[in-house]
Amino acid sequence: MLNIAIVGCGNMGGGHALAIGYGTGYTDWQIPQVIDEEIEATTTDISKILHLSGICDIDPVRREWARNEGFRVYESYEEILDDPEVDIVLVALPNHLHREYAIRAMRAGKHVLCEKPVCPTSAELEEVLKVSRETGKVFYPRQNRRWDPDFLLIKKMYDEQLAGKPLSLENRIGGGGADGPFGWRKEKRFGGGMMLDWGVHLIDRIVQLNKSKIKQIFCQVINLNGTDVDEGFNLTLVFEDGFIAYIESGAGHYDGITPAWRLNCEKGIGEAQAMTGEGAVVLLGKKREGDFSAVHNALPVRKPTVKRGEEFNFFLHMPKNVDEVPLERLVFDRNALYRNLVGCIEGTEEQIVKGEEALRVLRIMEAALLSAERNSFVEFE
Ligand SMILES: NC(=O)c1ccc[n+]([C@@H]2O[C@H](COP(=O)([O-])OP(=O)(O)OC[C@H]3O[C@@H](n4cnc5c(N)ncnc54)[C@H](O)[C@@H]3O)[C@@H](O)[C@H]2O)c1
């Protein structure tokens, strides 16, 4: 059992406090609207691997909240660093503070779990990784959306080529609201902007699918409110093997209308809705007699609760006589990242989200913003 203390008890830090403090792994807003327990095949019992030592925050309201939840509140960050019982510091501060707080923790002998985007620039992250190597302390980037059910579903379609060879992919997520990013997220000096917010997750997942080099990057940013950050972006990544990924993030995309994911493949497409395990693979083939569509087969890979023959209306153009082929239960461990962090520290597991991977994602984002500035393709790797 390792002891973890959290610095920054806002939206995310508070969520971690609940997840670890109560031992469930659920942050408050994840219960159960977003996470569907039926699709969780395996779940690490977080209460057996991590103990919450306490939290610290400069905001008295957040400290009071933590006290009311029954968590220990440290008076200062120094108090956490001086506590010999603390093995890991979880950095959940606004982005511009990550570098300094992570380095101080490692120099004080603590391992670090750092919220994404770990740092606002690749140069800052290089410095952090150098300190991790010098001190021998684990620095773990919390790029947790690799374990989201929608991504796992798309990854299954991609890796197993359920609709044939993947050719291109679209992924979009709404966020920021009509007024654009809020709070510190709307200011560059605090590491704001949608690229550093959602961009990290979106890019991190796509480079987990296609491992070839990225040759070219093209990006346009959206700014509707006159802030000094990107309030949204449209990004195209062209991979060495010809695969193309198109990513959108911004206030204008209401997630309920279009599927978050579309994987275009040689023999058909795969689609998945944001955050859930809902999706389908549709294979294009010969027209069946009586059909008005080229679609002749479909593999709904929705929640395993979907019964054979049940009306399947995910695709409005789908003919009634689709063949449903039940797929295996989606394996999903909502606490996989925490488990891997502990495994790395104890020397029993290899780090899944590597510092070098976080660095590459930051470099991709920097190239994307450069492309937007120049309004032209940027050559990458
Ligand atoms: N991985 C994810 O899915 C995910 C989701 C949301 C946020 N995040 C990340 O979590 C981090 C925090 O985001 P948030 O939404 O919780 O922001 P937030 O504004 O809700 O919380 C930040 C907290 O840090 C506190 N704080 C600021 N300066 C401090 C200091 N010097 N010492 C102690 N406390 C200080 C603030 O008072 C606030 O309570 C960001 O890096 C963000 O990118 C990650």
Image: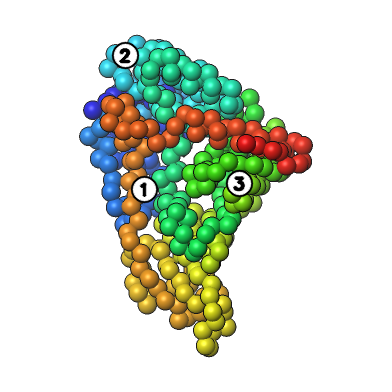
Q: How is the image coloured?
A: rainbow
Q: Residues within 10 Å of mark 1 (few under 14, many from 20)?
A: few
129 vs 200, nearest the viewer: 129
Q: Earlier in the sequence, mark 3 or mark 2?
A: 2
Residue 89 image-quadrant placement:
top left
Label 3 vs label 2, nearer the camera? 3
Q: Amino acid type of disc 1?
A: Ile
Residue shown at the point (75%, 36%) measured from the top left: 373
Q: Amino acid type of disc 3?
A: Phe
Residue shown at the point (35%, 74%) measured from the top left: 308
Q: Residues within 10 Å of mark 2 (few under 14, many from 20)?
A: some
Locate residue 130 relative to residue 55 in the image: left or right.
right
C-alpha span from label 3 to label 2: 47 Å
Which residue is disc 2 drawn over? 83
Q: Secondary structure at mark 2?
A: loop
Which residue is disc 1 drawn over? 31
Cβ of mark 2 under 8 A from ligand 1: no
Q: Residues within 10 Å of mark 3 (few under 14, many from 20)?
A: many
C-alpha span from label 3 to label 1: 37 Å
Disc number placed over residue 239 in the picture, else none: 3
Q: Earlier in the sequence, mark 3 or mark 1?
A: 1
